[in-house]
Image (cartoon, helix red, strand yellow):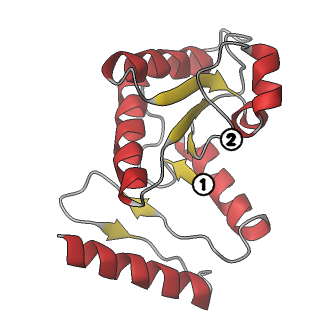
Amino acid sequence: MFICDTHVNENPDAEQLAEIAFMAVEEVRRFKIRPKLAMLSHSNFGSSRSTSARKVAEAVAIVRAKAPDLEVDGEMRGDSALSAEIRKQFDPQSPLTGEANVLVMPNLDAANISFNLLKMTGSDGMAVGPILLGAARPVHVLGPTSTVRRVVNMTALVVVDAASK
């Protein structure tokens, strides 16, 4: 699972969220994984008209307009992103199949909190990242709580990045 943007953009606007989504798609494809994007919000497909929900819905429209073949949907809650059954209750026509593997969060707080919760509870020590995208060169982040396994995983990723550049 890929979570965006955990470290850089505090409160991205719709255009920035769309750009974050496109950078994530490119990175996910480097891993030979078919990206399935969920643009996340507290709102499910228009259930709220909050500023944040409208921003995410606008970002989804931008992504769909620029990449109509990309499997993307939103704005949606996290449970809808990870369960086709739940998602279909709110949007029977959702183009997203199965479980999303790229979660584009509405802001830095949501992304960073989600990443840190997941790395502690659901990743079995397999968390890799953060990987900062959009810089002139690859940037990989290790924090003071990084496990040995995480350091080894990140080192392997850095080697692959260096070899491909």
Camera-side residue of 32 and 60: 32
Residue that label 1 marks: 1
Camera-side residue of 154 and 15: 154
Of tags 1 and 2, which is closer to the observer?
2
Residue that label 2 marks: 99
Q: Quadrant of residue 73?
A: top right
In this rendering, the answer to whether 89 lies above or below 153 is above
Q: Quadrant of residue 94?
A: top right
N-terminal of the pair, mark 1 or mark 2, is 1
Type of residue at label 2? Glu
Type of residue at label 1? Met
Residue 78: x and y in percent read: 73, 37
Q: Is residue 163 left or right of residue 130?
A: left
Tally of marks? 2
User: Mark 1–mark 2 contact, CB under 8 Å?
Assistant: no
Which quarter shows the C terminus? bottom left
Q: Is residue 159 left or right of residue 92?
A: left
Camera-side residue of 65 and 69: 69
In this rendering, the answer to whether 58 lies above or below 108 is above
Rendered residue at 60%/54% (across/down): 1
In this rendering, the answer to whether 149 lies above or below 141 is below
